[in-house]
Amino acid sequence: MQPKLTHHHLTAEEVNDEHGQAILLTQQDGIEEPHSVLVHPWQLRAVCEEFGIVASDEQAAKTIRTLQRRMTSLLGRIEHLAGWMTNHSDQRHADLTYEITLLQALQDLASEWCGDFADNVRTHCGQDAQASLRGGAAPQQPGLPGL
């Protein structure tokens, strides 16, 4: 049985013609005869990529790498700030319980999110990504340690 998709008045089905696999798109327009077009799956994919309906594999991979890099950098900064607030801030003289609790919750979230791709980042990006996971690759700003 050939796969078939029907959405409102459009039907898409996988067919085989003399050139190989193809997709037959049929649109019913009122009571008139339906309009059909036969396209190769790669043509349909190219059209969808061109109009931003789906991302090409290369673009998706680039976006994933960018988001992973940004997330690991954020985790490093959160970890540094959590360590500084816990060990070096004046929390004994001021009640920073709420701030520290919120910061630790952010640290837990960032660690969880980065944990899903940490091995992938280490494998594909090498030592720089490992340093970033530890917070060592975060850019430094004068007067703001680790930020």
Image (cartoon, rainbow, N blue to C red):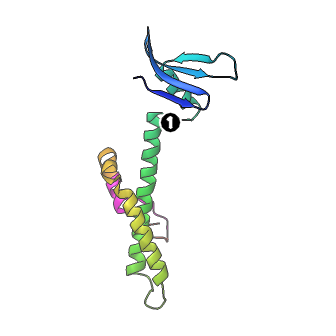
Q: Position of residue 44 (x, y in %)?
A: 52, 24
Of residues 125 and 27, the one nearer the viewer is 27
Q: How many marks?
A: 1
Q: Residues within 10 Å of mark 1 (few under 14, many from 20)?
A: some
Element type at mark 1: loop
User: Where is mark 1, residue-wise?
Assistant: 55
Residue positioned most to the top: 18
Residue 34 location (% of width, % of height): 63, 18
142 with respect to 75 (left or right): right
Q: Residue furthest front?
A: 31
Which quadrant holds the N terminus?
top left
Q: Work out whether 130 lies above or below 12.
A: below
Q: Is residue 67 magenta?
A: no
Residue 15 location, quadrant: top left
Q: Which residues are magenta?
A: 129-142
Residues 29 and 56: in front is 29
Q: Quadrant of residue 28 in the image? A: top right
Up/down of 28 relative to 128, above or below: above
Residue drawn where x is 52% and y is 25% of the image: 12
- Say left or right for 27 vs 80: right
Instruction: Give coordinates of residue 93: x percent, y percent.
Output: 46, 91
Looking at numbered disc 1 in the image, what kind of residue is underneath it? Ala
Q: Quadrant of residue 89?
A: bottom left
In the rendering, at what x and y percent does residue 143 appear?
A: 49, 71
Q: Residue drawn 48% across and 33% down? A: 56
Q: Is residue 119 above or below residue 38?
A: below
Q: Residue furthest bottom?
A: 93
Residue 117 higher or lower than 61, as above or below: below
